[in-house]
Amino acid sequence: MKVRFLGTGTSQGVPVIACNCDVCHSSDEKDKRLRASMLVEVDGLTLVIDAGPDFRQQMLKANVKRLSAILITHEHYDHVAGLDEIRSFNWVQKHATDIYAEKRVQESVKKVFSYVFDNNKYPGIPQMNLIEIKDKPFFIGKTEIIPVRGYHHKLPVYGFRIGNFAYMTDVKEIKDAEIEKLKGLKVLVVNALRKQDHLSHMTLSEALKLVDKVKPEMTYLTHVSHQMGLYSEISKELNDGVQFAYDDLELVFE
């Protein structure tokens, strides 16, 4: 399995428009964060988790030539806005792109991209094949994917476990029964927005408490805001086995 962090930032990305903080003016590439998204290559599949506003840029930067499917964690704009850009994959692969999402998220996608599902379709629009995720494992090809429920304030969202890898973003709370689904991981990716409390995202301390419960071999923190601080400084605060992720970081493991 190979995974690549396509983006590790928040809904605003980093740098933030019109912000004068040290992070937003940093020359360190690890302080520049596109909207959160993940590329997973496994069993001959090329999967993307979430397609936000930076999807086109991320696909070009990662040189993605073929796309097997997109998994959507939830319906917020910074996780679905780039779905229109699948048109290029539709053209090259000559078929619709499979989009995996729970029913509520599918309905939101249909509203945002109403022209895709209109009876009188305009030529050249994206071709989406919406496939419903329910609270049970499913397969893409021979690859098993386990949905893991979390809560983004009161909004139910899904993270995904694929083999020894799991990706949880935009979560504030994960119930104990769902945490059990994350045991035995080699790599856990979880959001850590900032150090100060937040209504709908885990803070750094809350993410580290989850790590203590899950006990993965390695954890990478994503969906990091400019309020967390400079990468070069905040990285020194973490213990072995935990690291702040950064855009374009690649991992290869079994």
Image (cartoon, rainbow, N blue to C red):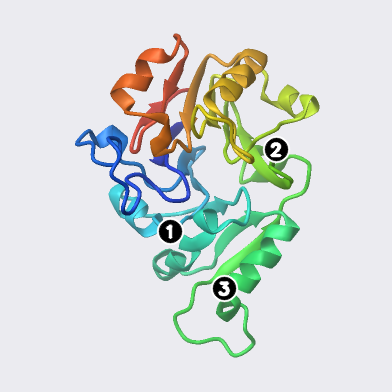
Q: Which mark is residue 17?
A: none
Which residue type carries mark 2?
Gly
Q: Which residue is mark 2?
A: 150
Residue farthest left in this picture: 27
Q: Distance from label 1 to label 2 (Cα)?
A: 23 Å
Secondary structure of the residue carrying numbered label 2? strand
For marks 3 and 2, the one nearer the N-term is 3
Q: Distance from label 3 to label 2 (Cα)?
A: 25 Å
For marks 3 and 1, the one nearer the N-term is 1
Which residue type carries mark 1?
Pro
Above or below, 234 against 74 in this view is above
Front-most of 31 and 194? 194
The picture places residue 101, in percent across and down from the top left corner, at 66, 54
Nearer to us of marks 3 and 2 is 2
Q: Which residue is mark 1?
A: 53
The reply, left or right, for residue 27 in relation to residue 36 is left
The reply to whether residue 184 is in sight is: no
Front-most of 253 and 249? 249
For marks 1 and 2, the one nearer the N-term is 1
Front-most of 185 and 174? 174
The reply to whether residue 2 is in sight is: yes
Q: Residues within 10 Å of mark 2 (few under 14, many from 20)?
A: many
Front-most of 127 and 54? 54
Residue positioned 49% across, 55% down in the render: 51
Above or below, 238 against 150 in this view is above
The picture places residue 115, in percent across and down from the top left corner, at 56, 81
The picture places residue 21, in percent across and down from the top left corner, at 30, 39
